[in-house]
Image (cartoon, grey):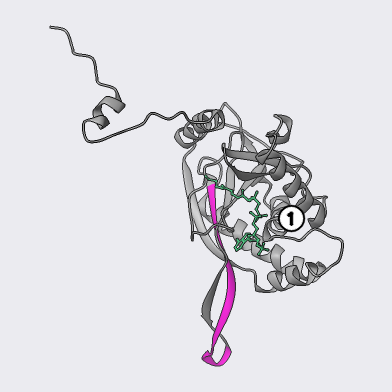
Amino acid sequence: MTDSPTPSIEAMLSQFGATERLPLSRIQVIGGRMLHKNWNDIPHVTHNDLLDVGVLEDCRRVLNQREGVAKLTPLPMLMKALAATLSVFPRFKAALDTDGQHIIARDYCHLGFAIDTEKGLLVAVVNDCDTKSIDTIQSDIVELSEKARSKGLSAAEMAGGCFSVSSLGQIGGTSFTPIINTHQVAILGVSRLVEVPERGDDDQIVWRKKLPVSLSYDHRVINGADAGRFLAELQQQFNHMTQSV
Ligand code: CAO
């Protein structure tokens, strides 16, 4: 007895109504394979938190009144604070060796950031975020994202990241699970800033600006307690930054 061939997905779905077969872009095909591999290979846990960015947002508003300097979004300030946090918690910018028994520590701090383009998702890398100013990080973000959306990025512009950020803040959402990139052990997802009521002194209600963040980490290398401490340090770095800008 011969098995009848399995019908194609399209043939199966067409039984119920009209369908159309459309190609995925090259970026989606290649990127999708990598996402699938990383999702399968890395045991992800996502730790969600709300960071207080009220004073930081006030600083950003003041900085954005300067003449002749590109407007800052929250992203470069976050990347600068992350660079400082990663110097306190260097394990978050290490890679797991193929033997599964060592980590490869990195002495540099190149941060990837996800860019939404018409052809799919790309991750560009801003090198040396620990030594660059917030303004320089901002101009690198703008230059790389414009290039990603027009000509596309070179392999070198997407290589070498130690840790990544995926910001959906300008679009919306309250949390999500970002997928860790190859040769990295963590990624920070950022959602839209919210104002939340908190109990203040004398029990009065105080409205606070909070940034929802979602830290996915490789549980072979990082434990939940480390993730909690990492985000507590990121909050501290935000607080320090407001004193230095
Ligand atoms: N909450 C509220 N508003 C935010 C915000 C946040 N967390 N982050 C940015 N914004 C606001 C900025 O303040 C700015 O508003 P104004 O124009 O009023 O000042 C606006 O959103 C700017 O957004 P932007 O997208 O131009 O700039 P950015 O620096 O925030 O982000 C980039 C740049 C390239 C990361 C972004 O354009 C992008 O492509 N994000 C998508 C990433 C993505 O797809 N991730 C998902 C990966 S998983 O599939």
Residue 111 visible? The answer is: no
- Residue at numbered disc 1: 80
Give the percent coordinates (x, y) of residue 205: 53, 86
Q: Residues within 10 Å of mark 1 (few under 14, many from 20)?
A: many
Check the image and name the residue furthest to the left. 1
Q: From this view, report whether residue 138 is shown above or below residue 50.
A: above
Check the image and name the residue furthest to the right. 68
Give the percent coordinates (x, y) of residue 174: 49, 61
Check the image and name the residue furthest to the top. 1
Ligand 1 quadrant assignment = bottom right
Q: Is residue 142 left or right of residue 244?
A: left
Of 79 and 219, which appears nearest the observer?
79
Q: From this view, report whether residue 157 is shown above or below residue 142.
A: above
Please identify the quadrant where the C terminus is shown.
Answer: bottom right
Q: Amino acid at mark 1?
A: Lys
Give the percent coordinates (x, y) of residue 72: 74, 60
Does residue 215 belong to the magenta stretch? Answer: yes
Residue 106 visible? The answer is: yes
Check the image and name the residue furthest to the front. 18
Q: From this view, report whether residue 28 is shown above or below residue 202.
A: above
The residue located at (55%, 46%) in the rendering is 222
Q: Is residue 17 left or right of residue 31?
A: left
The boundaries of the magenta stretch are 201-216
Of 212 and 100, which appears nearest the observer?
212
Please identify the quadrant where the N terminus is shown.
Answer: top left
Does residue 88 belong to the magenta stretch? Answer: no
Asked if the residue at label 1 sits under 8 Å from ligand 1, the reply is no
